[in-house]
């Protein structure tokens, strides 16, 4: 991976962080910074791949069948944010459970990357994502607090309605390898920015291991999945920024006014 | 119970359960069986962890069908080189004395010291610093003293250090081994071949060890301090990795030396380490976002939330804890989550920008307050200005545009101080109040 000269990188970094630039095929946002995109696409090796994921747990109360040690049936999982198949990126997922469980280290080697258990206690689960060797050598760890009981203590426990806690995050690969890029360039689970002109990859061969479905679109628990949409949050943020910017302008005006006044007063208060 | 019912048998009398209960109770109190209670209490009143002698064992000893006598008999020891005959008591069973060697003879192990012929010496073992005579002497001593080099070094006629003797011995053994082996592969597993004796390393190791052992408590404390400091420095450097790469290898090379050279270099080392560290913080401030981005890019993989955290931290690095809290309070008032619920790239970017803008806003507010305070003091011709008091009142008025009280400078602080300040505050605030009226009026017109 050749490193381009640093001053150039700095310049490019500013627009990258200041505006919504490289995004997935799904979101439809207005992109005023087309010019910046062009600059970025000219640069080589500044291709950042991101994989949006959702991880969390769904817990069902067992009701009558519940006993002291097994009051809930829960499932902890990692899925693609849009329920697409992530196995081209993730090789296996290791869930580290509380030591009171038998074999607390559970390895899941094929999608869907989930683990179901019965228990009574809430604890932190360490989820370690292991990637394919051409994706990343080092594993990535996530931490999720298993939740069985609803936040609101007054809500009665129901067998039909589970407690769902999901967190959205994105796995970012700042300098992906060529083979990885080739494998996922048009895959719906992965966000690949627009590649520089002239940089093309051959379409990947169908992977026989992918004959079995690996996406979670028709997962039995899919009705409880949260749909994370960035649109709302972006709107909120934009509105907040507007407010703050107006306020800043006002303050600046006030400061200049006062400075003007003080300038006038200064000669009179000479001692 | 139910079975007995069905069969029509009479139920067992109720007296059985209480009996059962009383028995275990008695048992636990009367644990000792054969040992008197007082003796048992000497052991602490509890049964020992290891099964002690069973009391039944003590009381009855069935007469065995064997006839055992003890006789004073002579014996020989195969471990001895001479034919000395000593006597001892022997347990004779049914008139048959025990057979076999002296039971302790098997413990007489000796080390096999390799022996070389003169030929072999001439061929493989000649060494400029060692004469044949010396080498022979060394090997004799090794055999005599079972390779106890401390004694050998002491007994060796010419003064040689222990490391030298060891070095000579091991290298000779190694050469012999290699020479006698049919093929090098055969002996490659032998420890002598795999890991050869390294005299200089041994010297250093021993010196370091003696230094560590002879450290005074003060030095130990100093060491611990320096190491803790170094750790902190190393951790704070992690963020500035991209910028400071050239400095790292230099200081890391110095690090192992701390364990060896204590006295003089300790102080100089900490100074040296501090000097390069003084540079990074200043460059960190200058480098700002590019260094955080650079360090993120160094990672093979990371989470978007982690990246946002780093960027937020970097952006707030120039602000104090109170300012950061105010930023968070502002975010909450604006209805924004402190950690975005859907942290996509765009959302994170917007969030970061919002935070930066809020920081700017707070700084401007502070600036405005100082200016106003300055203004009022100039007007009065007095240098005395109540900073906390006056701005609090002014700011409260015009900030009602969108945030109630939270935006006021030290809003939490002001609120808390209010009840206290009512007394003295009122008195001293009057002189400046006419001055305040004027700036306040202007603000009203601005709105």
Image (cartoon, coloured by chain):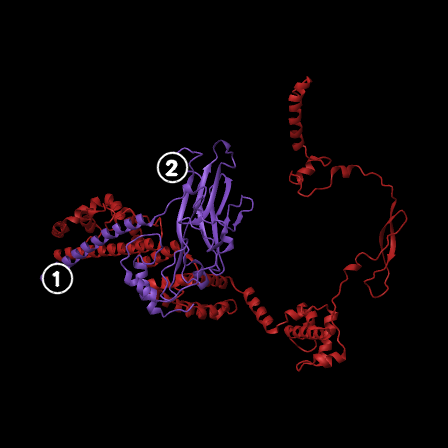
Colour for chain B in the figure? red
Taking depth in this image into account, of A132 and A8 the one nearest to the observer is A132
In front of the other: B182 or A170: A170
Residue under disc 2 on the same chain as residue under disc 1: yes
Picture coordinates of residue B87 (x, y %)? Answer: 86, 57
**Which chain does the numbered disc 2 sit on?**
A
Residue B242 on image: x %, y %? 39, 66
**Quadrant of residue B308 within the rendered picture:** bottom left
Q: Horizontal placement of A214 versus A12: left or right?
A: right
| Residue closer to the observer: B205 or B161 | B205
Q: Chain of mark 1?
A: A
Say what secondary structure mark 2 lies in: loop
Q: Earlier in the sequence, mark 2 or mark 1?
A: 2
Image location (x, y in percent) of residue B193 = 66, 71
Q: CA distance from mark 2 to mark 1?
A: 59 Å
Q: Is residue B306 visible?
A: yes
**Which image quadrant for residue A24?**
bottom left
Label placed on residue A263: 1
Q: Residues within 10 Å of mark 2 (few under 14, many from 20)?
A: few
- Residue A99 lies left or right of residue B53; in this view the side is left
């Amino acid at each position: 991976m050749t490193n381009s000269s640093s001053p150039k990188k700095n310049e490019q970094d500013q627009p990258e962080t200041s505006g919504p630039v490289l995004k997935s095929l799904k979101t439809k946002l207005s992109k005023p910074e087309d010019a910046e995109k062009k600059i970025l696409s000219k640069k080589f090796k500044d291709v950042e791949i991101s994989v949006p994921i959702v991880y969390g747990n769904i817990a069902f109360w067992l009701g009558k069948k519940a006993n002291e040690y097994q009051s809930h049936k829960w499932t902890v999982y990692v899925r693609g944010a849009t329920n697409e198949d992530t196995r081209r990126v993730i090789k296996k997922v290791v869930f580290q459970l509380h030591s009171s469980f038998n074999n607390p280290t559970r390895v899941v080697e094929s999608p869907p990357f989930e683990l179901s258990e019965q228990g009574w206690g809430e604890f932190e689960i360490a989820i370690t994502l292991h990637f394919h060797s051409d994706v990343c050598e080092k594993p990535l760890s996530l931490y999720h607090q298993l939740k069985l009981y609803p936040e609101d203590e007054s809500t009665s426990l129901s067998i039909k309605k589970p407690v769902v806690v999901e967190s959205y995050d994105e796995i970012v690969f700042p300098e992906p390898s060529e083979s990885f890029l080739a494998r996922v360039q048009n895959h719906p689970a992965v966000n690949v920015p627009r590649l520089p002109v002239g940089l093309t990859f051959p379409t990947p061969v169908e992977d026989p291991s992918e004959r079995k479905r690996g996406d979670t679109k028709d997962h039995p628990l899919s009705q409880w999945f949260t749909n994370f949409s960035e649109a709302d949050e972006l709107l909120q943020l934009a509105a907040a920024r507007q407010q703050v910017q107006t306020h800043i302008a006002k303050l600046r005006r006030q400061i200049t006014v006062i400075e003007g006044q003080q300038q006038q007063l200064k000669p009179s208060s000479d001692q | 119970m139910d079975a007995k019912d069905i069969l029509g048998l009479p139920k067992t009398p109720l007296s059985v359960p209480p009996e059962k209960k009383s028995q275990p109770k008695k048992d636990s109190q009367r644990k000792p069986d054969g040992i008197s209670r007082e003796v048992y209490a000497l052991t602490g009143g509890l049964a020992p962890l290891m099964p002690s002698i069973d009391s039944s064992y003590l009381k009855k000893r069935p007469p065995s069908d064997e006839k055992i006598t003890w006789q004073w008999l002579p014996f020989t020891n195969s471990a001895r080189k001479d034919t000395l005959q000593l006597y001892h008591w022997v347990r004779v069973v049914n008139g048959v004395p025990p057979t076999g060697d002296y039971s302790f003879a098997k413990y007489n192990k000796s080390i096999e010291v390799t022996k070389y012929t003169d030929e072999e010496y001439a061929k493989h073992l000649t060494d400029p610093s060692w004469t044949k005579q010396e080498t022979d002497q060394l090997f004799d001593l090794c055999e005599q003293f079972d390779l106890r080099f401390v004694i050998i070094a002491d007994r060796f006629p010419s003064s040689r250090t222990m490391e030298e003797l060891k070095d000579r011995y091991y290298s000779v053994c190694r050469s012999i081994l290699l020479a006698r082996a049919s093929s090098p592969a055969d002996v490659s597993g032998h420890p002598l071949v795999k890991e050869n004796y390294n005299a200089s390393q041994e010297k250093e190791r021993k010196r370091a060890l003696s230094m560590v052992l002879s450290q005074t408590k003060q030095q130990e404390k100093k060491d611990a301090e320096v190491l803790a400091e170094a750790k902190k420095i190393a951790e704070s450097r992690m963020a500035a990795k991209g910028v400071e790469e050239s400095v790292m290898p230099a200081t890391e090379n110095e690090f192992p030396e701390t364990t060896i050279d204590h006295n003089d270099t300790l102080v100089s080392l900490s100074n040296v380490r501090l000097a390069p560290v003084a540079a990074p913080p200043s460059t960190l401030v200058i480098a700002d976002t590019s260094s955080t981005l650079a360090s993120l890019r160094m990672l093979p993989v990371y989470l978007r939330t982690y990246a946002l955290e780093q960027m937020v931290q970097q952006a707030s690095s120039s602000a104090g804890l109170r300012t950061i809290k105010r930023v968070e309070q502002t975010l909450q008032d604006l209805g924004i989550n402190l950690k975005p619920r859907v942290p996509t790239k765009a959302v994170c970017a917007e969030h970061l920008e919002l935070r930066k803008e809020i920081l700017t806003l707070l700084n401007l507010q502070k600036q405005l307050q100082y200016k106003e305070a300055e203004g009022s003091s100039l007007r009065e011709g007095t240098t005395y200005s109540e900073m906390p008091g006056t701005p609090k009142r002014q700011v409260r008025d015009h900030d009602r545009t969108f945030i109630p009280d939270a935006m006021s400078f030290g809003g939490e602080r002001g609120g808390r101080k209010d009840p206290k300040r009512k007394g003295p505050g009122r008195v001293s605030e009057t002189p400046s109040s006419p001055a305040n009226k004027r700036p306040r009026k202007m603000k009203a017109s601005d709105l």
